[in-house]
Amino acid sequence: MTDADERLSPPPGYLALFRHPVASRLVTARGISELGDFVGLAALLLLAYDQTQSVLGPAAVYAARALPALLVATVFSGWLDVPARRTLLVWLSVAGAVLIAAPLAVPRPVPAIVAAGLLGAVRAAYSSVNVAVAAESVDAPLRLPLFGLSAFANQVGQVVGLLAGASITVALGPRVALLIDLVSFLVAAVVLAGLPTGQQRRRGPRPPATAGIRTIAGHPVLRGVALLTLATVVSGALPETLTPDLADGAWRPVVLASSALGGAVFVLVLGRGTWLGRLTGQVTVAAALAGALLLAALLVATRSPVWALACANALIGAGGGWLIGAQATFARLAPVERMGQVEATIVAANIVVAGCGIFLLGSAAALFGPAVAYLLAGVLLLVVVLLTRPDRLPADAGPHPTGPTP
């Protein structure tokens, strides 16, 4: 197939990001906020556990993040494309600082859980508007490197932030770690306040909550990429979920971190090229991810060495890195004036599908063994890959017009 996205210019590389007035601030603020977020999350998790002496405390912190994020990305998604986007990003960062101040002042489980829930909403809105700013103000050749470096910051921030946050909390108490998170929000707000104002404008009446869904459903390429995205996130947390049952001792942290490490390396290397900007590249990597899941199923079923499973998990994490290409495709084909809501719709769908998917796969692992969970995830993704392979997706050079919104 000759994709319309074959005409993309070669990305100029990561150094060019830091010469761009918008991209440089977006990636800098993202790196700061990701590191601070995971430092704060580690503190909230340990605080909840120490205060409740139960794993239900940390579980409640995680669970509390999902519902508010889902509401923002669905019911309130229409508000994301109304105010000026620079202003909204700054105020979302400030809101994060205000929210984290509650458990900082009162380090108890209830403030920690409430803050975690509302921060989940802030993160969902921030991520959606961040992509919308990139689609509006960053040239197409720079978007894939921007999304790649942002994904790398997320992976590294998760590893370093959780380790540092847990260490600081144990050594100095949760307040110090939460203070670091609060400061990171404020620093990110200062960085974002320096975004150019040339294209920051109000966008008129608030669209309905279903506008994002209708935009995706009405575009054949976005439909296919969205379906492939959902099939991918089903197994996103599978390696980490199954690790306690498959590895112990010194190998457990290695196997646990292998997926994130594979994803970090993949997005850093492939994010500066053109391949993931094309539909063919995205579908090819998704197919490779299905193969990695099937390989992991085989390794577990045959009781292969733990180091082999760690390698398979790294391949799974790397395969999931194709999602930065999906972001680039959405930023290129979705209408700019609806980009925040379209991205929020994908965020909401990912939250629901990932949560339900990992519950079902975890149940399959509990009933039939971990190999079956890997097998089901791989087969599902392979079926969707066959349904959305590039020759089934029509070439499309640009976004569909939104037209009047009822």
Image: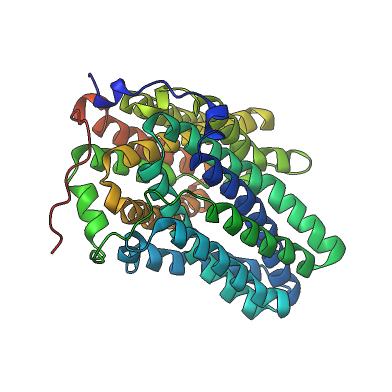
Query: Residue 322: which quarter of the image?
Result: top left
Query: Residue 57: which quarter of the image?
Result: bottom right
Q: In the image, residue 383 lies at what x, y percent?
A: 30, 35
Q: In the image, residue 243 lies at what x, y percent?
A: 63, 45
Q: How many marks?
A: 0
Instruction: Tell which of 132 and 224 is nearer to you.
Output: 132
Image point 24% across, 25% down: which residue? 4
Quadrant holding the C terminus: bottom left
Quadrant holding the N terminus: top left
Say whether residue 4 is left or right of residue 172: left
Say whether residue 311 is left or right of residue 13: right
Q: Is residue 182 visible to us here?
A: yes
Instruction: Tell which of 344 and 353 is nearer to you.
Output: 344
Instruction: Tell which of 392 and 189 is nearer to you.
Output: 189
Q: Is residue 303 visible to us here?
A: no
Say whether residue 80 is left or right of residue 188: left
Using the image, determine if residue 347 lies above or below residue 18: below
Image point 78% across, 40% down: which residue? 250
Q: In the image, residue 40 lies at what x, y percent?
A: 68, 61
**What colouring style does the render use?**
rainbow
Using the image, determine if residue 210 lies above or below residue 265: below
Q: In the image, residue 268 lies at what x, y percent?
A: 57, 30
Query: Residue 225: which quarter of the image?
Result: top left
